[in-house]
Image (cartoon, helix red, strand yellow):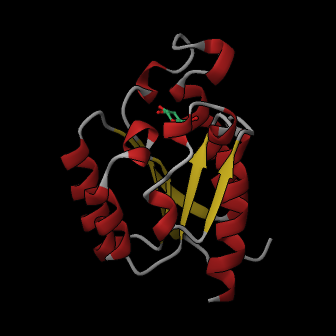
């Protein structure tokens, strides 16, 4: 698989995603965040990427991690969870990041309440994947492997 060896991908998960597996499983499925993390690490190893997988319930902490990524990360995958729909601060931090950004949601946010149809994150994202469950993270890694290899 063609990809820049060791390209570093920051995978960020926003509030309440730590509850995956027990939180509204009819919407978010039965996999835990730790299951998702294992899948992401396995896929990244196949693609020759290195991944730093994180979750926070704190908007400021997510902003700080995105800021820090400017120094040592090549790309970001972000499921901002509820902050997707509210956080100009996360948008601004992502706009200051120079590498590719892929937005992921487990659920199809466009099939849900109207307030979930708007995403601030999308304004900074090169691509958006939603409605495919945890597979969305793996598809995002595929897309980034191609992007990083092409850059
Ligand atoms: C979510 C969708 C958001 O609207 C919601 O607030 C979440 C999870 C998803 O992955 O489907 O917490 O980002």
Q: Residue furthest right?
A: 1
Q: Position of residue 91 (x, y in %)?
A: 35, 63
Query: Count of labels shown?
Result: 0
Residue 146 vs residue 115, the one in the foreground: 115
Residue 103 vs residue 114, the one in the foreground: 114
| Residue 65 occupies quadrant | bottom left
At 65% from the left and 21% from the top, the residue drawn is 27
Residue 3 vs residue 129, the one in the foreground: 129
**Is residue 16 shown left or right of residue 67?**
right
Q: Position of residue 146 (x, y in %)?
A: 72, 75
**Is residue 126 shown left or right of residue 94?**
right
Q: Residue furthest bottom?
A: 151
Residue 37 vs residue 55, the one in the foreground: 55
At 63% from the left and 36% from the top, the residue drawn is 106
**Is residue 46 shown left or right of residue 93?**
right
At 63% from the left and 13% from the top, the residue drawn is 25
Q: Position of residue 57 (x, y in %)?
A: 29, 33
The quadrant in which the N terminus is found is bottom right
Q: Position of residue 18 (x, y in %)?
A: 42, 25
| Residue 143 occupies quadrant | bottom right
At 53% from the left and 10% from the top, the residue drawn is 22
**Is residue 3 shown left or right of residue 58?**
right
Q: From what the image shows, is residue 12 above or below residue 36?
A: below
The answer to whether any part of residue 29 appears in the image is no
The answer to whether any part of residue 23 appears in the image is yes
Q: Residue furthest front?
A: 114
Q: Residue furthest top?
A: 22
The quadrant in which the C terminus is found is bottom right
């Amino acid at each position: 698989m063609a990809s820049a060896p060791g390209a570093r991908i920051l995978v960020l998960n926003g509030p309440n995603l730590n509850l995956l597996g027990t939180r509204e499983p009819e919407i978010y499925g039965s996999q835990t965040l730790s299951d998702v993390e294992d899948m992401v690490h396995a896929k990244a190893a196949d693609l020759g990427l290195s991944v730093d997988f994180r979750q926070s319930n704190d908007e400021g902490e997510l902003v700080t991690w995105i800021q820090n990524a400017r120094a040592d990360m090549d790309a970001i995958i972000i499921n901002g969870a509820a902050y997707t729909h509210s956080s100009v601060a996360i948008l601004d931090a992502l706009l200051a990041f120079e590498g590719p950004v892929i937005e992921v949601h487990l659920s199809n946010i466009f099939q849900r309440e109207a307030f979930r149809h708007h995403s601030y994150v999308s304004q900074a994202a090169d691509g958006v994947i939603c409605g495919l469950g945890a597979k969305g993270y793996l598809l995002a890694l595929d897309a980034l492997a191609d992007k990083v290899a092409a850059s």
